[in-house]
Amino acid sequence: MSFETAFEHSTELFNAALEEFIEKGYEQASINTILKTAGMSKGQFYYHFKTKEDLYLALIAILIARKREFVGTIMRPEDFQQDLFGILRTQIRYGLMFARAYPAISRFGESFVREQGSAIYKKALAIHNFENDAAMTQLIEAGVARGDLRDDLPLAFIHKLIAYLITHAADLTDLDQFDSVERNLDYLITFLKSGLGRSG
């Protein structure tokens, strides 16, 4: 559910929640503090959200939508003329541009990774993962049609592997250092291409 313009104080709620979750993490974040910062009453909040969890998951959905919109806006037709791995590499590069353009959202992403292993982290990943992502499925199917992928492995396995590694890419790098992030994500795509790409 996108709530940024759905009701009075929604933008303030978005910004207050973002900062509170960044500063304190999910468990320690306080709805009371968020509402005080946003200038919003408890009654109005609970009319739209049942729990802190609902707010957190809605916030993640908004941030993912913003990133997709950003990347979709700057992707050029020629970017899609590459093989699957080139397209993934380009999308990651544009995603890092988004992180640089919106540092608060990037900081929230870092705080989310620190939730790893918690119930809220698992729930969020179950909802937002690339295995069930229509755009990722489309990219892989187009890659198969172009002959980008080796044909001695089941497509379902290839899809699961790519989706899993992209979903958990943040585990492979130091999120505090952009150069490290970019380098390690590039290594990931190189690894995927060497292992899953059609040789010759």
Image (cartoon, rainbow, N blue to C red):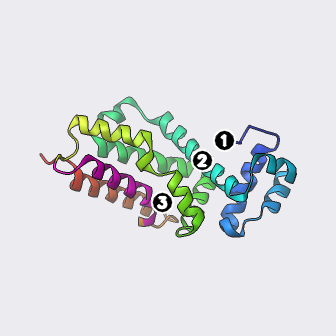
Q: Which residues are magenta?
A: 152-171
Q: Element under label 1?
A: loop
Q: Camera-side residue: 119 or 196?
A: 119
Which residue corresponds to mark 3? 178
Q: Main secondary structure of the magenta part?
A: helix
Q: Camera-side residue: 47 or 182?
A: 47
Which residue corresponds to mark 1? 2
User: In this image, 10 relative to 145: left or right?
Assistant: right
Crowding at mark 2 (Cα within 10 Å: few <14, some 14-19, many 20+): some
- Inspect the magenta stretch and tell me whether residue 195 lies in it: no
The x, y position of residue 6, in whole percent, is 74, 37
Query: In percent of the image, x 66 and y 55: which residue is there?
Result: 56
Query: In percent of the image, x 22 and y 56: which residue is there?
Result: 195
User: In this image, 133 relative to 4: left or right?
Assistant: left
Q: Element under label 3?
A: helix
The x, y position of residue 8, in whole percent, is 82, 40
Crowding at mark 3 (Cα within 10 Å: few <14, some 14-19, many 20+): some
The amino acid type, in three-letter code, at marker 1 is Ser
- Identify the mark nearer the N-term, 2 or 1: 1
Q: Is residue 166 visible?
A: yes
The amino acid type, in three-letter code, at marker 3 is Phe
Q: Circles 2 and 1: CB distance less than 8 Å?
A: yes
The x, y position of residue 65, in whole percent, is 57, 42
- Identify the mark nearer the N-term, 3 or 1: 1
